[in-house]
Amino acid sequence: MITLNSERGLVQVDDWAQIESRPGFIKDLDPSQHVLKAIIGRYVFPDKIRCGLSNCHTPHAKGYLVVTADGHETNIGKDCGSRYFGVDFDELSRRFDRDLLDTENRERLTNFSFRSEELERRIVSLRQSERGADWIYRNCQALLNINRGCPTGVVRQLCEMVKTRNATVFRSRIASNDELSVLEAQVGRRLERPHVVREAVGTLQGFEALYPENDLRELLVIGIEAKLQEFAKLQIVNLTHTELRAWTKWTSDVETNLDRAEAVLRAGRKLLNASNLDLLADAQADRADAAAFRAFCRQLPVANDG
């Protein structure tokens, strides 16, 4: 690929023959007889081409198109340019690469701006639809925070499960005499009475919706919606090199993060299902906690598909 910086802006040229046919282009430029004026293009090829300097001609796959003070053009690799034109070439190549990247990033941001309204509508739909992101976030926060509607025992159990990334719900109970006999035979010593054992009740579906990195407020509201509002106020033409890179990085991640938010939404709908969360009620040793959690679950859907 060949990229030229012309009066019309950046131009992509596919055929090297078009470069060699440009007025002033020569294949044997003597660097001792010419002063470098500017870099006007950059190229990357799968096959190597010869350097245009008369005392070099080293084949290379990546290089620059340059123009001299007297209007001659040729092509040179980066090493050749540094060797024969020194600091001037190094500075010009850095500036050209930077300017090229800035131009490309401005174009990306401009193209992205045409999608902003579509993305905003998509976010509103994700947040406000039936059992949407806002509903899922609110109910997940109730499961993970005390005094948000769920019994303390359930909240603590879920927080521990999230910490260990284990979706299996366990219930604690006093071991029977028969169970104690088996356990004591296994460990070879007498166990204290009463002895508490944990048994698996089941596995929560959609449990990943509770993971910190899947916080829908962070993903959608802060990470995308608020940034879109900030992006709408930008003057793209005035952005600095650093700002252009940062905003281009953000725009390149938007689609991925939206897809991720949709996946979390699907997981949240599976999780926030009365029949799914009923496992936690069954696991509570405190009857009051079990009753209170079942009351919380009554607000949730009971569809088998989550």
Image (spheres, rainbow, N blue to C red):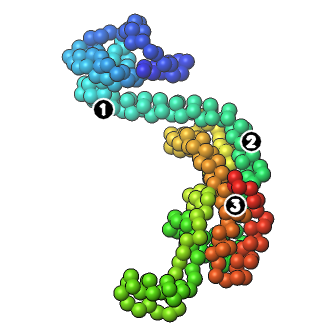
Label 3: how many residues lie within 10 Å, few (<14), some (14-19) or many (20+)?
A: many
Q: Earlier in the sequence, mark 2 or mark 1?
A: 1
Quote the CA–CA distance across marks 1 and 3: 64 Å
Q: Tell me where residue 91 sits by quadrant.
A: top left
Quote the CA–CA distance across marks 3 and 2: 25 Å
Q: Secondary structure at mark 3?
A: loop
Q: Residue at x 50, y 19 (%)?
A: 11
Q: Secondary structure at mark 2?
A: helix
Q: Residue at x 52, y 30 (%)?
A: 104
Q: Which residue is mark 1?
A: 87
In the rendered image, is residue 203 in sight? yes
Label 2: how many residues lie within 10 Å, few (<14), some (14-19) or many (20+)?
A: few
Can you give x and y, in whole percent of width and height, for residue 83 in the image? 24, 27
The one of 75 and 259 positioned closer to us in this rendering: 259
Q: Residue at x 60, y 41 (%)?
A: 255
* Disc number placed over residue 272 in the picture, else none: 3
Q: Secondary structure at mark 1?
A: helix
Relative to 14, say whether 302 is above or below.
Answer: below
Tag nearer the camera, 1 or 3:
3
Q: Earlier in the sequence, mark 3 or mark 2?
A: 2
Relative to 109, say whether 61 is above or below.
Answer: above
Label 1: how many residues lie within 10 Å, few (<14), some (14-19) or many (20+)?
A: few
Amino acid on which the number 1 mark rests in the picture: Val
Can you give x and y, in whole percent of width and height, for residue 283 in the image? 63, 75
Residue 65 horizontal side relative to residue 124, left or right: left
Q: Earlier in the sequence, mark 1 or mark 3?
A: 1
Q: Residue at x 44, y 90 (%)?
A: 191
In the rendered image, is residue 230 in sight? no
Amino acid on which the number 2 mark rests in the picture: Arg
* Disc number placed over residue 181 in the picture, else none: none
Q: Which residue is mark 2?
A: 121
Amino acid on which the number 3 mark rests in the picture: Leu
